[in-house]
Structure formats: structure tokens, C-alpha cells
Amino acid sequence: MKTQQTQLHLHHPHRHRGRRQRLALLATAGAAGFLLLAGASPALAQSAPGKPAAPAAGMSKDELVARGKYIVSTSGCHDCHTPWHVGPNGPEPDMRRALSGHPQAMVMPPAPKLPEGPWLVVTAATNTAFAGPWGVTYTANLTPDPESGLGKWTAKDFIETIRTGRRMGRGREILPPMPYPVYNNMTDADLTAVFTYLQSIPAMPNKVPEPRPPAAPVAGKS
Ligand code: HEC
């Protein structure tokens, strides 16, 4: 994982929204650069974050898919949602399993205890499972498989997830390192394009495990 965690000044590993948002932001410093570029495009000025999802109208389905593919491939989604393998040129996302999330067959053992010091996060070889102060999280299956992916989601469910940090805007909280606070800067038009693209890729059945809560905090230790 090309992470960026060296700057974390996290001494109290309690669950806290602001802190988790910072974590997620730090975890995707790379994705943030793109968003600056995206903000410069006049096509994107149509809708502000938080407005209803109308402005994607006017784009054909093919245009939405192309736009969504561009955003997904420049915003780091593959970094975490596509399992990494060692390819001919070294570690890289395995595009045969594009965006299918943490492989269900890869059962992670308990995370190792972190050493003293500013190390904070442990990452699986696939870059699809993460252990940190929030517990253990596994990247979701974003393909349109109806049972294990987003096949039953609507564009509204997807947008509300990114806007609120809760599944479909009403379910459980989305945990780090999913950088929804970064993607919340996207317009509704762009999020609609991302969702339209995700619904267009091959469905891959892959049931991702639920997150595991953090181990109980050790008394007297911070
Ligand atoms: C730094 C790693 C990382 C990046 C980059 C990332 N995600 Fe995630 N994402 C996660 C993790 C981990 C979860 C699961 C969090 C949880 O279980 O609470 C997740 C969950 C989600 C969910 C919730 C799905 C569900 O069923 O609950 C959606 C939707 C999602 N990501 C979309 C995206 C999109 C779209 C992008 C790119 C624009 C992206 N993610 C980039 C790590 C990442």
C-alpha cells in the first residue's frame, strides 16, 4: 500500500469521528490530487455536493460509464477494492478481480500487535484488509453482484453512502480507510457517473467479511 501514514499523530486509538475522517484522508493523499483536477473541469461545476442527483441528466449512459470509469481509475478505488497480486512488474491490482473487494477465501488471521512508535496500520498483501485503531476492515465488493456486491443498490443509495459515511445513508458507519470524506467533495453528477460505471462492470460473487471491532483498549496505555 502506498501509504502516507507517517504523518499521523494519533496517540489515542479511540473511535472518534473527526479522527477517523483524518485517517481516511491521510490514507488517500494520492486520490486527493485528482479531485483538485476534477474541480477545474467546467463540466463539473453543474452541481454542488449535497444537491439532488439531477445534473447527470443530459449525459448518455455511455458517457456516464466513461466518465465513471475515468473517475474510478484516477481516484484510487482500485488501490483498495481490487485485490493486489504480484504481477510481472511487481505488486499491482489484479484486474481479473477488478473492484471485487477482499477475497472471501482469504481468511485473515488476527492482526499482529503493533510495535511502539508511530506505526499505526497493518495491511494485507492484497491491500484489501486493514487493521488499525478502528478494528479490522475489509474492502467492499463494488461489482453489481446482487448478493455480495452493489447489485441491489440505487444511485441514491450510493450517493447517500458517500455523503453520510453510512451504508446507504442509513446503515452502519463506514470505517477507515475508506476515504468517503474525500469523495464527498465530488459532485452528485460525478458520483452518479461512478455508480453507473460500477453497475456496468462484470458482477463477481465475493462475500466480504464484516468488520471486526478493535481489541479492548489497554488500561493506562494510550
Ligand atoms: C484507502 C482504501 C480505499 C479506497 C482508496 C477506496 N475505498 Fe471504498 N472502502 C474501503 C474499505 C476498507 C471499505 C469497507 C469499510 C467498512 O466495512 O466499514 C470500503 C467501503 C466502500 C463502500 C461501501 C460498500 C458497502 O457495501 O458497504 C463503497 C460504496 C466504496 N467503498 C466505494 C469506493 C469508491 C467508489 C472508491 C473510489 C472512488 C473507493 N471506495 C476507494 C477502502 C477504500
Image (spheres, rainbow, N blue to C red):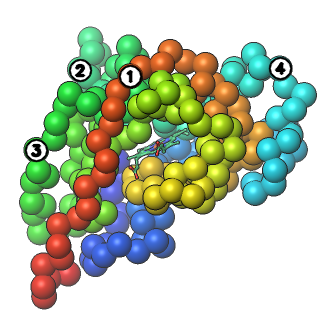
The image quadrant of residue 83 is: top left
Left or right for 56, reference 146: right
Residue linked to disc 3: 109
Q: Is mark 2 within 8 Å of ligand 1?
A: no
Residue 117 position within the rendered picture, expressed as x and y whole percent measured from the top left? 16, 69
Residue at (85, 41) in percent of width and height: 54
- Viewer-nearest residue: 63 or 114: 63
Which residue is more in the foreground, 164 or 8? 164
- Return the residue at label 2: 86
Residue indicated by mark 4: 60
Tell me the SS state at disc 4: loop
Residue 143 in sight in this render = no
Label 1 to label 4: alpha-carbon separation: 28 Å
Closer to us: 106 or 68: 106
Cα separation, mark 3 vs mark 1, equals 23 Å
Eye-nearest disc, 2 or 3? 3
Is residue 6 positioned above or below 63 on the image? Answer: below
How far apart marks 2 and 4 lie (CA) works out to: 37 Å
Q: Which quadrant is the N terminus positioned in? A: top left
Label 3 amino acid? Pro
Q: Residue at point 83% right, 20% down?
A: 60
**Circle 3 Cα neighbour tier, 10 Å, few/some/many (<14 / 14–19 / ≥20):** few
Task: Identify the mark nearer the N-term, 3 or 1.
Answer: 3
Tag on residue 126?
none
Q: Is mark 3 within 8 Å of ligand 1?
A: no
